């Protein structure tokens, strides 16, 4: 004989789990170990025969060979059926959702998981084994899940419970019946008990957590203590609530936790009960109400850890701007670093806060150039590092703001945002903003930049850079070769201009360097090499967790503004560090691996021209676009970011692509990503690409520097006069070039052009005809 049973004072989850087990163990007898909860008793008064439920009284235990326990492993809750555990050769199968406790029954088969209801575990088995269910049976199982999960609202509810509910509804489960049995108003007895609990409620503060304790004594057992505890917690909103009620010969304790700092299951296991971190219960026979309350308080005072505070989750150092920072620049910093607002600091004092909404409002009025002091909020809501996170959360909601500066006295020490709060509430929460760069490992192989400089620069130019480093050091500055200049040097590519940057006043340095080279218009040239010198300037200040301003990493700020990680590189030139390659963002690895990667997820929003630029570089360098970078590129396209780029800037980037070493690959990258149809609507990619492939082959060995011009004329010829005119308007093509395009379309022979142009245009006409 096989017996299915559950715990005494059987609730709907215990009953439903028994019914579900009977589907998995056909022929097994469902036996109640003792009295059921009154609501279940009411249900069984109508449905007992239909379900085939038996009582333990009169059951002969000798012939039981297998015991199936559901919704419990606690031997003390099995009543008279506990005697079965002494039967020799008894096989035990267990389905339970409560945490393990000392003295638990052990089974040869145990299906145990921290889900909202034990019934869920059995429903999963039923679905897996494709066991048929009637609508009535599905409804009974729904009762079990809905009761133990508080109609899927209790914190213990999991996605597995939701999937089980979906399955049961598909099998015809009736939520109307569920609502009828679970959604009934409180009985008169429950109302009296609830009133007593409200009147007897004690409020304690333990380690910064709000604890609610309430006790009451009634003569007969009253069902629904878990529901009453839930309602009491809804009214009082404590971090943890315990209800202690003496009924008949036992003291019943129900705990509910709203804070991750406390595990009520662990608390009540100390009283012989059990449950989950957020919902648990215990029943202690012959105990004293006051004694149980004192034991609970003692445990909480000894074991309760302080709540999570703002100081533990805040962002520090915190980026700040001054009142004179322009609105546009503040907006760029927010976008670049994924912030929704920035504190405004003047003379070391917090004087306001500027939000993304403030920035958008100013831009809509055409006042992006205005200082933030005209748009910032001066009534700043702040918190201290010691404030519990839940209080910071309440302040954000109350004031409908996205961030709270964290201050100690009058010192700014950090900032806490909605995102910081959400990370504490939701495990594995992924904010919209993320960094994509992978900093170089300390053990990673690094380029020897000194060797690279010697290999690719003439001795006179190398000497010039060494002299620049010596002069900068004498003036108390650091000077670097930065950005694309470093990238191209490492790749052995020539470029027309190299960029230098120093962290001090560069006018005197420029003047001194101009004595040994030709200096004009901010450039210094010698031996066909030109250098552009500029000053590194901070876009923001940072304050650490002690409220002190950090020494500004001007170079890091500068490199973080670059388009891609392979551009975010610098080579130090001062004598004590000459040739040291500075790589904050893993650009060396991406260069070696042939990858193009943006530095953060908002990169294409910050500068949408990067959409075309990355495709151009991918063709020029024959690099791949990193997977996440490609995803953010597609998202930017879908958001219409490319259409927001001024036409003349787009044309500059397109022109560079048409001048590049591999035009067919550039056009292919445009087509693969869907950019082609946005740049050249109505122009057939197949014909344009075939033309580019043929011309690329013929141009090899040619000295012509006008590839872009011939391709542009060819594209306009393929598109027709109307689309060509629209192209010129959209990209603000200069008048002289637009006139040439117009003349060519009217007279394709090209006789009005020079000899070289006429030759290539005739080749184009031959290829396009």
Image (cartoon, rainbow, N blue to C red):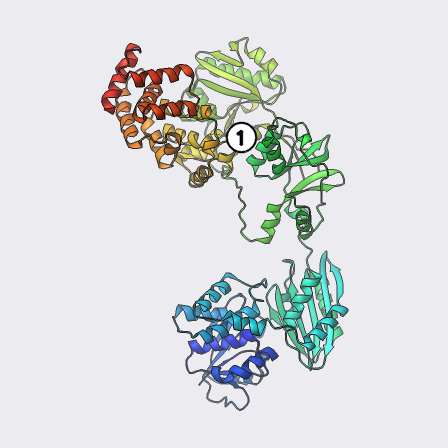
Q: Nearer the viewer, residue 422 or 634?
A: 634
Residue at the image position 24 percent from the left and 19 percent from the top = 763
User: In the rendered view, does 175 fall on the left or right side of 716?
Assistant: right
Q: Position of residue 424 (x, y in %)?
A: 60, 51
Q: Position of residue 324 (x, y in %)?
A: 67, 27
Q: Answer yes or no: is residue 97 visible.
A: no
- Which residue bears the numbered disc 1? 561
Name the quadrant containing residue 491. top left
Q: Position of residue 240 (x, y in %)?
A: 68, 62
Residue at the image position 55 percent from the left and 75 percent from the top = 12
Q: Is residue 453 above or below residue 540?
A: above
Q: Position of residue 645 (x, y in %)?
A: 48, 29
Q: Nearer the viewer, residue 440 or 193?
A: 193
User: In the rendered image, which quarter contains the C terminus?
Assistant: top left
Residue at the image position 71 percent from the left and 40 percent from the top = 380
Residue at the image position 58 percent from the left and 11 percent from the top = 511
Q: In what element is the residue under mark 1?
A: loop
The crowding category of the residue bearing disc 1, from other C-alpha atoms within 10 Å (few below 14, some 14 to 19, many at least 20), is: some
Q: How many marks?
A: 1
Q: Answer yes or no: is residue 404 visible.
A: yes
Q: Is residue 543 above or below residue 521?
A: below
User: In the rendered image, which quarter contains the N terminus?
Assistant: bottom left
């Amino acid at each position: 004989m096989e017996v299915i049973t559950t715990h005494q004072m059987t609730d709907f989850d215990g009953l439903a789990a028994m019914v579900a087990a009977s589907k998995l163990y056909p022929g097994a007898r469902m036996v109640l170990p003792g009295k059921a909860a009154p609501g279940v008793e009411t249900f069984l008064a109508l449905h007992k025969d239909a379900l085939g439920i038996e009582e333990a009284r009169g059951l002969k235990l000798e012939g039981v060979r297998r015991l199936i326990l559901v919704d419990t492993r606690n031997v003390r809750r099995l009543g008279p059926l506990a005697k079965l555990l002494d039967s020799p050769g008894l096989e035990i199968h267990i389905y339970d959702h409560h945490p393990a406790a000392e003295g638990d029954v052990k089974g040869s088969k145990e299906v145990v998981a921290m889900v909202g209801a034990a019934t869920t575990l059995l429903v999963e088995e039923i679905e897996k084994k494709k066991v048929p269910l009637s609508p009535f049976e599905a409804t009974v199982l729904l009762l079990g899940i809905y009761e133990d999960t508080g109609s899927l609202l209790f914190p213990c509810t999991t996605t597995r419970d939701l999937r089980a509910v979906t399955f049961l509804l598909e099998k015809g489960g009736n939520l109307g019946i569920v609502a009828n049995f679970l959604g009934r108003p409180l009985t008169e007895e429950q109302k009296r008990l609830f009133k007593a609990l409200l009147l007897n409620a004690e409020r304690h503060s333990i380690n910064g957590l709000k604890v609610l304790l309430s006790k009451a004594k009634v003569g007969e057992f009253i069902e629904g203590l878990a529901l009453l505890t839930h309602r009491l917690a809804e009214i009082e909103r404590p971090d943890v609530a315990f209800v202690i009620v003496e009924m008949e010969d036992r003291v019943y304790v129900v705990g509910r936790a709203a804070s991750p700092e406390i595990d009520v299951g662990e608390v009540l296991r100390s009283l012989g009960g059990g449950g989950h971190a957020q919902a648990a219960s215990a029943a202690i026979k012959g105990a004293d109400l006051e004694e149980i309350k004192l034991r609970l308080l003692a445990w909480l005072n000894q074991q309760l850890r302080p709540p999570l505070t703002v100081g533990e989750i805040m962002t520090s150092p915190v980026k700040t701007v001054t009142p004179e920072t322009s609105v546009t620049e503040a907006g760029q910093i927010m976008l670049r670093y994924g912030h929704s607002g920035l504190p405004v600091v003047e003379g070391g004092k917090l004087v306001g806060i500027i939000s993304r909404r403030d920035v958008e409002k100013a831009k809509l009025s055409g006042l992006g150039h205005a200082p933030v002091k005209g748009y910032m909020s001066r009534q700043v809501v702040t918190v201290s590092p010691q404030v519990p996170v839940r209080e910071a959360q309440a302040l954000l909601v109350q004031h409908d703001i996205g961030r709270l500066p964290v201050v100690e006295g009058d010192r700014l020490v950090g900032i806490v945002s909605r995102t910081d709060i959400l990370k504490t509430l939701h495990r594995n929460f992924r904010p919209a903003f993320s960094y994509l760069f992978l900093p170089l490992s300390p053990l990673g192989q690094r380029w020897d930049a000194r060797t690279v400089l010697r290999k690719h620069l003439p001795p006179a130019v190398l000497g010039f850079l060494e002299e620049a480093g010596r002069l900068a050091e004498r003036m108390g500055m650091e000077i670097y070769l930065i950005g694309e200049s470093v990238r191209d040097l490492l790749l052995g590519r020539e470029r027309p201009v190299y960029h230098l940057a120093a962290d001090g006043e560069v006018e005197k340095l420029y003047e001194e360097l101009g004595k040994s080279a030709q200096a004009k218009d901010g450039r210094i040239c010698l031996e066909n090499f030109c250098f552009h010198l500029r000053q590194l300037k901070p876009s923001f200040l940072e304050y650490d967790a002690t409220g002190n301003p950090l020494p500004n990493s001007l170079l890091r700020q500068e490199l973080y503004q670059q388009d891609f990680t392979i551009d975010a590189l610098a080579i130090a030139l001062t004598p004590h560090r000459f040739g040291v390659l500075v790589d904050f963002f893993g650009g060396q690895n991406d260069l070696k691996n042939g990858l193009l990667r943006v530095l953060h997820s908002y990169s294409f929003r910050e500068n949408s021209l990067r959409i075309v630029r990355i495709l151009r570089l991918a063709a020029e360098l024959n690099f791949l676009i990193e997977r996440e970078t490609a995803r953010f590129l597609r998202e930017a396209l879908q958001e219409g970011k490319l259409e927001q780029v001024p036409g003349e800037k787009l044309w500059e980037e397109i022109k560079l692509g048409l001048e590049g070493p591999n035009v067919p690959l550039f056009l292919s990258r445009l087509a693969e990503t869907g950019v082609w149809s946005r740049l050249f609507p109505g122009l057939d990619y197949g014909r344009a690409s075939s033309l580019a492939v043929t011309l690329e082959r013929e141009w090899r060995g040619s000295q012509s520097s006008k590839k872009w011009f011939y391709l542009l004329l060819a594209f306009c010829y393929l598109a027709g006069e109307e689309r060509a005119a629209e192209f010129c308007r959209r990209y603000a093509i200069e008048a002289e070039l637009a006139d040439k395009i117009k003349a060519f379309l009217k007279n394709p022979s090209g006789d009005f052009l020079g000899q070289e142009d006429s030759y290539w245009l005739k080749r184009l006409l031959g290829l396009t005809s």
